[in-house]
Structures are given as C-alpha cells and as structure tokens.
Image (cartoon, grey):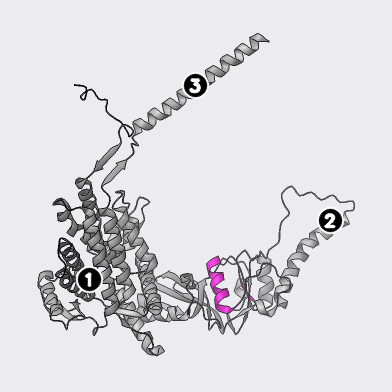
Amino acid sequence: MAAMLQPQIILLKEGTDTSQGKAQVVSNINACTAVADVVRTTLGPRGMDKLIHDDKGNTTISNDGATIMKLLDIVHPAAKILVDIAKSQDSEVGDGTTTVVLLSGEFLKEAKPFIEDGVHPQNLIRSYRTASFLAINKIKDLAVSIEGKSLEEKKSLLAKCAATTLSSKLIGGEKEFFANMVVEAVLAIGNDDRLNLIGIKKVPGGNMRDSFLVNGVAFKKTFSYAGFEQQPKKFLNPKILLLNIELELKSEKENAEIRLSDPLQYQSIVDAEWNIIYDKLDKCVKSGAKIVLSRLAIGDLATQYFADRDIFCAGRVMEEDLQRVAAATGGTVQTSVNNVIDEVLGSCEAFEERQVGNERFNIFSGCPSGQTATIVLRGGADQFIEEAERSLHDAIMIVRRALKNSTIVPGGGAIDMELSRYLRQHARTIAGKSQLFINSFAKALEVIPRQLCDNAGFDSTDILNKLRQKHASGEGANYGVDINTGGIADSFANFVWEPAVVKVNAINAATEACCLILSVDETVKNPKSESAQGEAAASAMAGRGRGGANFRGRGGRGMRRR
C-alpha cells in the first residue's frame, strides 16, 4: 500500500514531449528515408529536376542535392542532419550532394530491420564504421593518378571530370562546351584557392552557346552621368587606376556655419570646393592612367572632365569586381589620389566596352597577373541561367579538387559495385553478427547504380545482376551502368570519371550521419504551446502589478510619516 502512495516524480515541465527507445530510433530512420526519397530521382544524367516554390513566391528549378535540401524547410530534428551533410559535401567537394543523402538514407534503411529485431545500435555503429574504413582504403587502392601528365593531357582529363559532373545537370546537352570553359577558368586562377576570383555573370537572352569566357574581368556597365558617351570605349595596354573615394562635389555638412567679415570671402569659400575636386581630378590625370574605376560615385563633373582628356571612368563598381580587377591587373585600390605612383597602377593588354545581349559589359582581357577569369552565361529563362550557374559552380569545384587531389575513380556506379563486392567478400571472413551488418552496408552501396537505372527508365534488377556477375569475375572493376544503351560498360574507357575525393567524402559523411542518427534513442521536445506562452505572459504581468502596488504602498507610508 505504501508503495502505491509514492508520489510521482516530475522531472520535466508539464507538456514536454519525450519519446525514447527502439520506437524513437525507427521513427528517426523513417524521417531520414523520407528526405532521401525527395532527392532520389535527381541522381545521374537522366535525373529529374525539382521545382521549388517558396513562401516569398520565388521559383527555383534545380537537381542539385544541396540546393534542394537547403530550400526544403525541414523541421524534423533527425532529418536536419541530412541537410547538414549535403551542405558540408557541397562546401568541401562541390559535387556528390545527392549521392551523400542517398547513401545515408540507404544505410539507415538497411539498419532498420536489425533495430526492429532488437540489435543494439552500438553494434551496428561499430560495424558500419569498420566497413566505411575498409571502403575508403579500397577507393584509395583503386584510384588512378593523373599526376605527371603534360598540360594538354591534364586539360583533357580535367575536362572529362567536369563533363561527368555536368552530364547530370540541366546544361548536360552542352557539357563538352562548358567543361572546356570551366577547365580554362580554373587553370587561369592558378594555385589561388579563392573561388570568387572566377566571376559568373548572367545575361538573359541568346542561347547557351553564346556564353563565353573572358581571361580577365568582365562586369556590367555601371551607372553613368552625362559626358560618358564622349569617353573612348576601347584601349590597348592602358594603365588602370583603382580608387575607393568619391569624385564629386562635396556639399557642406548639415547646419554648417561660416561667419564672414567681408562679402568677398564668400567667393573664396565657393572656389575652395571646386578647387578640391579639380585638384583630385588633375592628380588622377597626371598619374598617366587611362581607365579610372572607383567603388564610390564618380559625378557628372568628373565624368565630363575625364571625357575631355580621353580617359574612361566608371563609378560605383561593386567591391567584388574591383578586387578581381586588382588581382588581374596587378593594381592596388587607393583611398587617396595623393602620390599615385606607377607601382599602384594596374595594366592589361586590351580593354573594351562591348554589348552582350541588352547589357553593356566592361571587359579587361590579357591581364598580366592572369589570376582571374569571368564566365558570361547566356540563356533563355532566368531560372535556367540560375541553374546553369549552380551547375558550373559544381563543375568548378570538381576541377579544383581534381587538380589538388589528382586521383580519379570510374563513375556510373562502377566504384560502388566494386566496393560492394569487396565488402561482401570481406564479411565472409568475419565471425559473429558483424558479418550481417557489413553485408547490409555492402548492399546499401548498390543504391547508386540501382537509382541510376531507375531514373533512366531501365530494368535495375537485370542491370545490377549483370554488374554483380562482371565484378565477381575479377576483371570488371571499372564496369558501371551505361546510360546510353541501357546495359553495362567500362566507365573508365568511356571517360565517366570523378575525383576520388568525392566518393571518399560522400562515404565518410554518410556513415557519420547514419551512426549519429542510430545513436540517438531519446528526443525531448520542450513545450512551446501558445497556452504556455500565454500563461507565462499573464504571470509576468501579474508580478509587475504586485510590485507596483507594494511600491505605491511604501511611498504612501513614507509621505504620511513626514
């Protein structure tokens, strides 16, 4: 009887939602599988696109895993982990974002029956980590280096990596055209890691093949004043002055007050304003520069002054473009026009202002430092150009990675099938439950070739059986899905390549996310119901009221005592 009268121990606030145990792990797995199913159909050259319409009315068409994951407003706490790994894959490698989400979802799907049968999650985690370690080492063994090749050979190898990435994008039809453009752009910036040195400018109109690469800097014509039309629009070997100051008449500060004893002094004050601006302009001209760019405004007086002296000027140039001009031409951005020496001036072989579509572009080409490049993208619809920019970003990242980590592996699901075969073989040498777990990891890797077939409308069971047989024979390590014929083919011979670092990163991130989700066995949600907030607000108000009453009471007594 005494035991029955024990008071209930309340640890958490009333209304707190707690769910724990096996059911919680399974629920998290189901949530992650649902997220993976969203991006599943976007994988590969025949992947479909997603049209995402947000609450602000913006429409995005994309088949880039990371973009879709960012735009989906996922609220489930466990499923958010998949969004994070897609983002990390995008920032680290640039491509393989759909792959990483799919792999993670598949690992969890394979783990689900074991969890339901009562296997402890830690046993699964241990085996998955071992399998991931073995798989990554196997990738490093299978990878082929492209180091030590001549520049021309390297260019064609890198273009093949870029083409593999672009084949699954909206601009896949023109992948050779864009792959060469991306390789040229990445080689132009050399060893510099800053991605913003490759500018991508979007001009609606025309078709994709009207896009072009500038080995230098191109940016849209800035806002200009009268007199701009009289300036020359083309120079050969000009000197370039970069400024971060305004070149226009400064008005006095508000409420400025000048007291004069003589009316004649007024004219000298007005003249001083003009002298200051003329002095600045004169110093710009004396520096020998033929092009003056400033981040701040260049007014109508300055524009006309420069036009009379055959100098081109542009004000309100964006910070990013100005920095790229500085990197390309070897100039330095000045915050004063005093003491402008030759060392701070930039130079380039040619400058011209050219019409692109319905925009005017300022183009600097043949830059001595050559540390920057600009891709001008053309296309029909705005959404199309936006997606083309995202696709090129992925390709640029891939080419940079392939340059730095110069090892490649066959794509088209070939490496995944080979890893699956290797892990199944390894599992047979292990006693105990972990044999089953490593086998399930191996089976999960087959999701990539299977999904490639499904998305292309082929019979995935038939093609996977052919692939398993080919890989098991010991001589088909490079065989993957042939999207064109619906059979299997040597991915390496068909130049379907991807940098090894993409796969290593994807397997690493997917395994980590999977282990993290499996290790969570309880979720605690704090109550944030409106009633709770309403009560809190009411009690706070009541507290203030009481405090006020006491204060008034004390004040009243004090008054009486006096």
On the image, numbered disc 2 is attached to which residue? 266
Disc number placed over residue 546 in the picture, else none: none
Disc number placed over residue 46 in the picture, else none: 1
Name the amino acid, label 2: Tyr
At 27% from the left and 28% from the top, the residue drawn is 8
Cα separation between marks 3 and 1: 67 Å
Residue 350 occupies quadrant: bottom right
Please tell me which of labels 3 and 2 falls first in the chain: 2
Q: Position of residue 312 (x, y in %)?
A: 62, 75
The secondary structure type at the circle numbered 3 is helix
Nearer to me, 489 or 560: 560
On the image, numbered disc 3 is attached to which residue? 545
Q: Position of residue 204 (x, y in %)?
A: 40, 69
- Which stretch did the figure color magenta? 310-330
Nearer to me, 263 or 149: 149
Q: Residues within 10 Å of mark 2 (few under 14, many from 20)?
A: few
Name the amino acid, label 3: Gly
**Can residue 380 be seen from the camera position used here?**
no
Q: Quadrant of the C terminus?
A: top right
**Can residue 14 be seen from the camera position used here?**
yes
489 on left or right of 199: left
Q: Is residue 113 above or below residue 365?
A: above
Q: Is residue 101 above or below residue 524?
A: below
Q: Are marks 1 and 2 in contact (CB under 8 Å)?
A: no
At 37% from the left and 82% from the top, the residue drawn is 180
Cα separation between marks 3 and 2: 63 Å
